[in-house]
Image (cartoon, rainbow, N blue to C red):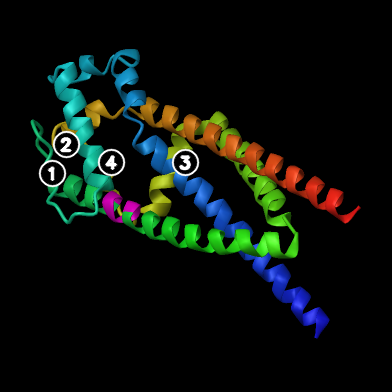
Amino acid sequence: MRNRRNYIHYFFKLLLTIFLFLFVFIFSVKIISNFKLLYYFDIKHLNIEKYTNLNKEQIKSTYDYLVYYINTTKPIEFKIPLLISSKEGIIHFEEVKNLFSKLNYVLFTSTLFIAFGIYFMKKHRNFAPLKWCSNLLLCSCLLIFATFFINFDKAFDSFHEIFFNNDYWLFSPQTDPVINILPEEYFLHCSVFIIFLILCWSIILRIIYKKNSNLMKWYSH
């Protein structure tokens, strides 16, 4: 009976680690996807105006629309102001919006599970999931960074091939000129910031784990 209970506790801690991991990853992606200042900086840094007929303010408003579209829960029709879009381009952005909607559900579920997990860890005075998740996040950061460092272009393509079952993300500037204001370098910058946020989360979870573990040792004495 005791062994069975130990197995259940171990399974729950493992599940909590996974939900923590998903929460950190998705939350970091959501933050960067809404961090417009990064893109505003890249407009000048990457000289985006050079590749489009839009001026800086028009580029900003177009980007703002894209951010709003993929993040809003409203079932709105995709229509970029000032730019034309092909049927395939529209479908791709609809798929991106659906992907973000699914991420929202996972984020919400993870938050609920983590809230219960905090109660579980305090009750049983076992904060191992924090350490496990910290290690998992750190390993993921190193793996992703190494992949990007070796060949970001290949990693970028592989990402789309995994999450989308078509090649509609391969935009043509003639039919989907929005691609001219979304250079690959910008997505590289987003990826670097996401890795940085995840690394910060890894450190924070490790600090919380050590602090609570030391506190439990102090109480035990």
Q: Nearer the viewer, mark 3 or mark 1?
A: 3
Q: CA distance from mark 3 to mark 4?
A: 25 Å
Of pointers 3 and 1, the one earlier in the residue sequence: 3
Residue located 55% across and 59% down the image: 114
> Residue 192: x and y, percent?
50, 30
Q: CA distance from mark 2 to mark 4?
A: 10 Å
Crowd band around label 1 with a 10 angstrom C-alpha radius: few (<14), some (14–19), many (20+): some
* Label number found at residue 28: 3
What amino acid is labelled 1 in the image?
A: Ser
What amino acid is labelled 3 in the image?
A: Ser
Left or right: 82, with 25 as reference point: left
Q: State the residue lying farthest toward the right.
A: 221
* Label number found at residue 170: 4
Of pointers 4 and 1, the one earlier in the residue sequence: 1
Reading the image, the residue beneath label 2 is: 176
Q: Nearer the viewer, mark 3 or mark 4?
A: 3
Q: CA distance from mark 1 to mark 2?
A: 6 Å
- Asked if disc 4 and disc 1 are in contact, CB closer than 8 Å, the reply is no
- Asked if disc 3 and disc 2 are in contact, CB closer than 8 Å, the reply is no
**Magenta segment boundaries in residue numbering:** 96-100
Residue located 46% across and 34% down the image: 191
